[in-house]
Amino acid sequence: MSVAERARPTARPRAALRLLGSELRLVAGRRRNQMGLLVLAAVPVVLAVAVKVTSGPSAGRGPDFLSSVTSNGLFVAFAALTLELPLFLPLAVAVLAGDAVAGEANLGTLRYLLTVPVSRTRLLVTKLAGLAIGAFWGVAVVAVVGAVVGIALFGTGPLTTLSGTQLSFAAALGRLVLVMLYLAACLTGLAAVGLFISTLTEQPIAATVATVIFSTLSLILDGIPQLAWLHPWLLVDRWLAFGDLLRDPVFTETVLQGLAVDAAYVVVFGLLAWARFAGKDVTS
């Protein structure tokens, strides 16, 4: 075996990492994405300050976590995630997904990417990986800012779980990380849908709007009791199951079901995106 042949298997992972790094720099460098992160970060700040300057959350209003904010600052992160999950976080993912392929095609840079040379499959996998990381970034910004502001305003200590038991601060941080990873996985399912839509058009705004419509329509359908038979198949149905990660012991059944649905959406819409992108004309 020649030196070049021995080096080739090592060069492939390095090339893949370079391509992913380039994709992440592109995502992080876009001004609208940076502004989007600022908007996501503003919600937990406004939430924490509003609770601090008032007598406390109103009974029966808002997410359940809101009533626990004043007892432990970490609940600001959980409450903010609950508030942003229906709209702001899906919108952020939709913007990233809309730019993934349609944005490149609109700017005329897509055909240059494919002359590096980079196979279309590798490029699409890199785009999906970048979207998954971008989804985690969005969730992490909300959670970290919420935790920092919450601890600064309300302090911390043992966290009372939804089962009534208490966790140490270190254990509570571990639960927060689990929640972040779960919600990032949920949003990756939506990112796969958005990636497929992004391969159907060269207008990133159209892809973004279509992805938001998909998310919003799923939430509407999930709220109709007469469609209970459809709910288990909806991407959004188990998004709020992250509350089960705050029980003691952790209730895993619904969370695992949610992860299975997320994985199915990633596989199905990832394959649809590949089937569309593999034959797409990007030479014009």
Image: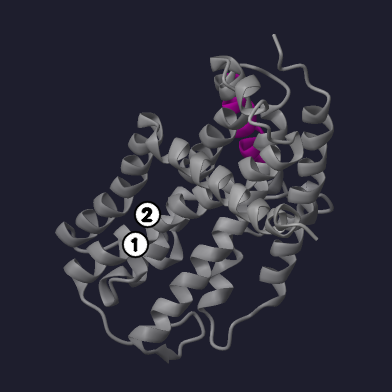
Measure how far apart labels 2 and 1 are at the Cα level. 5 Å
Where residue 36 sits: x, y (%)? 38, 37
On the image, which quarter does residue 191 sit in? Answer: top right
Residue 61 seen by the camera? no
Where residue 101 sits: x, y (%)? 63, 28
Determine which of the numbered discs, if any, sits on residue 131 in the image. none
Determine which of the numbered discs, if any, sits on residue 144 in the image. 1
From the viewer's perspective, tell me whether residue 238 is left or right of residue 272: left
Q: Is residue 76 magenta?
A: no
From the viewer's perspective, tell me whether residue 177 is left or right of residue 209: left
Q: Residue at x 76, y 43 (%)?
A: 270
- Do callouts 2 and 1 mark residues in contact (Cβ within 8 Å)? yes
Q: Taking 214 as reference, is 103 above or below it?
A: above
Q: Taking 114 as reference, is 143 above or below it?
A: below
- The residue tagged 2 is 141
Q: Residue pushed farthest top?
A: 284
Q: Amino acid at mark 1?
A: Val
Q: Residue at x 38, y 55 (%)?
A: 142
Camera-side residue: 178 or 230?
A: 178
Residue 255 seen by the camera? yes
Q: Is residue 219 magenta?
A: yes
SS at mark 2? helix
Bounds of the magenta segment: 206-220
From the viewer's perspective, tell me whether residue 112 is left or right of residue 159: right
Camera-side residue: 97 or 14?
A: 14
